[in-house]
Amino acid sequence: MRSTRPRLRYALSALFTAFLLVGTAVVVPGVAGRAAAEPWKPGAGVAGMINPEWIASHDGPTQYPGMTVDWDVPIRLSDGTVLKANVFRPADAAGRAITTKTPTVVNMTPYSKFVSALAQIAVNTPVLSDALIGFLNLFNFAGTPIAGVNDLRDVLNGGVLNSFTGVDRKLVQNGYTQVVVDVRGTGNSQGVWQVFADREQQDTVEVLDWVRNQPWTNGRMGMTGVSYSGINQLQVASKNPKGLQALFPVVPGADIAADIVAPGGGLGVGFIGPWLAIVNILKFIPDLRSLLNGTFDWTWLRDRIQNPAVFVPELLSGVFSPTVEGLTPTTKQLIDKDSPMRAAFRTPLDKITTPTFALGGWNDLFTNTEWRLPKDLSALPASKKKLIMGDVAHATATSDMGGVNQPTRADVLQKAWFDKWLKDEDNGIDNYAPVTVHRKGGGWWQGDTFPEPGQKYQRMYLSSLPSGTAPTALSDNSLQTAPPKIAARRTVGPGLSTLCSDDTGQAMFGLLVFTGCTKDTRVAEMNGLTFTSKPVGKSTVISGPINLRLNTTQDARDAYWSVIVTDVSPDGRSEKISSGQLTTSLRQIDESRSIRTANGDYASPYYQLDIKQRELVKPGQVVQLDIGTHAVSAILKPGHRLRVDVFALNLIKSMTVGPVTAETLFRPQHVVIDPKQPSYLVVPSDNPLP
């Protein structure tokens, strides 16, 4: 094993830090004055969410003084493809790897070990990382148009970067080996990127087999990672490989088609396009060491040249092909519920028996999966499955952790989880609340289940009567407890106003920092139909999925609908709490996977998303749709109102599939308000809504 070279480590750290600081300087208006909100600082937190012993175990003196790294270790798979892994091991004071066998934590990443290594060095280098975090904490953007920068800054405080990089130096120096592997076709690994497919899942199984047979491991393994590296944890755990005993997935998904590819039949171009570009660009970064020492892998280069833009043709055909026949074979699989790809994209969570501690967010890309984990991980008892749902997006995960009245940092929880299940330490992490949620508009709540107890569903009916609360909306209407008495029709056409919305922020990984868009939907509502309730008289918790039963008609043979549910403040601000979408021709529902209320209404419809079942309509035909929005935990404060917005387009979050676009032709769409067949929002709450 070779010790990490100090000069190289500090040089890379300085380079990475300089990059971050330069980027910060572009937007920093200045050091926040004391009149603004206080900078982040650690605190004791709410009882039950923070254990000082876990923090001391992670942040205190380590078992071993050093860490060694073996770079780009080859792992030959059953089909001959070679993956490359970085292996991080505990070291003694002389920099020699210890001989004691240790538990091993594996991270499978498509984002290149080179990039994660740079981030790992910056985050884990003593003094430098503390100075960087301390410097960034001096700045406070609260009250400015770019207040969302605070969330990005606070990610550093939340401890998640060690999960993203796959390496926590403190974890290694406390007796763990960490292995970071470039998945097939990415980073320094050979082959063609498989994007969650069966072959990639088999690769992960084989990597774990390889790890288990190395001389430095005791055979007990865990997995860690964010996003993609959280998804493949759940995938491989559903196969129950030997030796895998703990998972710590951050913002993971388990139903890729319904989560991000085509939720409700709308192609997730806002996320998928940039994401594909990132991975396909990063995979061309060569192994610089091999270029210098004459060991360059020409098979790696051949694979990259032959497959330069994986999945890009599929995305382009999905957007631009006017017919189903013109779609690529892979794109057709994505909208065929019985295809092998769709089967690979849906993880059977009920087969997982590996203890799992997951972190998610109400505005994440994978909220659809995350809120279901307590129920869907049905083979695990409460002691072996935990979920923390923050009020965060994909790139800002854990930004609301680690501070005052917040849960413990992610890296601290991760070490406690691995200590319990990989080292048999009786540290009490198994008694942590099964569900911990950050209520939008409120504080944290802990309990045994989600949705939260005491919730009852009710219908809130759409009415054409003006609410008087949305003067700038395309059409201001009411949401009421009784069916409407007056028939009406409200028209909305596709527009671009939703570019300024939190749905755009969600699609952009949470990188949209302009709070005039992410914290206020009124700009988007300028081309939307709004339906607003009366103000609540006391604090009301909304916990669970929401569904809009909507009577519609359209001027074409197909239509696309987008829905945003918001919390309206007395000052008029309209902040998103949940959203969903549906293509009219793909409205078919899988009853076995849907959730209904006690009176039979859909609370969470699950769509087939099957092109074979596509059902076009006649222009002018009235069609009833159930448009589900993802679950949420939120508080309506006294004086606040509930609102549902209806749109005919939702760029950049999603775009209609090419064959659907060819039918809609972006023509106007209409909501039909009919007293005999009313439209209504099916919403849970702990107090009746007015």
Image (cartoon, rainbow, N blue to C red):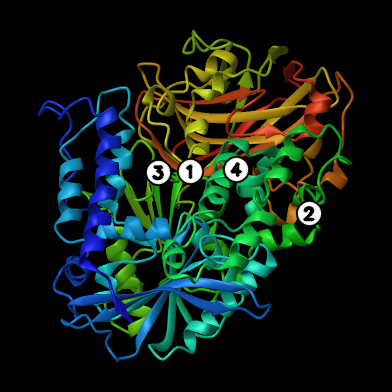
**Which residue occupies the foreground of this view, 110 or 459?**
110
Q: Which residue is mark 3?
A: 392
Task: Residue at 47%, 33% (x, y): give it.
Answer: 505
Real-space Cα distance between discs 2 and 1?
27 Å
Real-space Cα distance between discs 1 and 4?
24 Å
Q: Which residue is mark 1?
A: 632
Q: Which residue type carries mark 2? A: Lys
Task: Residue at 61%, 76% (x, y): give it.
Answer: 239
Q: Residues within 10 Å of mark 3 (few under 14, many from 20)?
A: many
Q: Position of residue 621 (x, y in %)?
A: 86, 23
Real-space Cα distance between discs 2 and 4?
20 Å
Q: Which residue type carries mark 4? A: Ile
Q: Position of residue 305 (x, y in %)?
A: 65, 54
For marks 3 and 2 on the same chain, the one whose residue lies earlier in the sequence: 2
Q: Is residue 426 above or below residue 514?
A: below
Q: Which residue is mark 2?
A: 337
Task: Residue at 43%, 75% (x, y): give it.
Answer: 222
